[in-house]
Image (cartoon, rainbow, N blue to C red):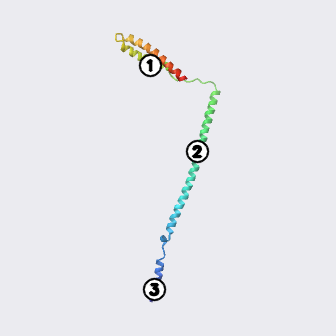
Amino acid sequence: MKKLVLIFSAAMMVLSCKPNANEAGVIGDSKQVTIDSMKVEMAKKEVTMAKQKSIDSMQAIVAQQRSRQVTTHQVVQTTSAEPVAQKRKGWSGAAKGAVIGAGVGAITGAVIDKKKPAQGAIIGGLAGAGLGAGTGAIIDSKKKQ
């Protein structure tokens, strides 16, 4: 009976010394497999993103070329059609200068001529309008050049 107990205890020691799954690296291997599969998936996503970026840039180039063609086509159409009346842009520089000069001149003339402010305002307004119109005309001619 002693021999049987010794054999049984020796067998138990041999079985208990066998490494378990964690010590054998089975769990570490499964973790590594997971990490490797994630790396593969990330690489696939990077390739897909690079392809999409290339497609997007090509689409932007095509859209840019189309807009240039449309603009060129529109220019050709407008030049070959009947002349279109141009819209007025507003006041000329000479007109603006005359109005501003008249206002400033009238105020200044009224302030300077204390005895007859109305007469000073009229004279100042005329002088200011003349100087303002001349200055505005000079500015307009410089803008055209």
Q: Secondary structure at mark 1?
A: helix
User: How dense is the environment of label 3, judged by Cα within 10 Å: few (below 14), some, or many (20 and up)?
Assistant: few
According to the picture, the residue beneath numbered tag 2 turns out to be 57
The CA span between labels 2 and 3 is 79 Å
Q: Secondary structure at mark 3?
A: helix
Q: Position of residue 20 (x, y in %)?
A: 48, 73
| In the image, residue 109 above or below residue 51 | above
Instruction: Residue 41 in the image: state x and y as whole percent.
Output: 55, 57
Q: Amino acid at mark 1?
A: Ile
Comes first in the chain, label 3 or label 1:
3
The count of marks equals 3
**What is the spatial separation of the Cα atoms under label 3 and label 1, in whole angstroms?**
122 Å
Against 44, residue 136 (above or below) is: above
First-in-chain label (2 vs 3)? 3
Task: Report which quarter residue 120 is drawn in.
Answer: top left
Which residue is the site of mark 1? 100
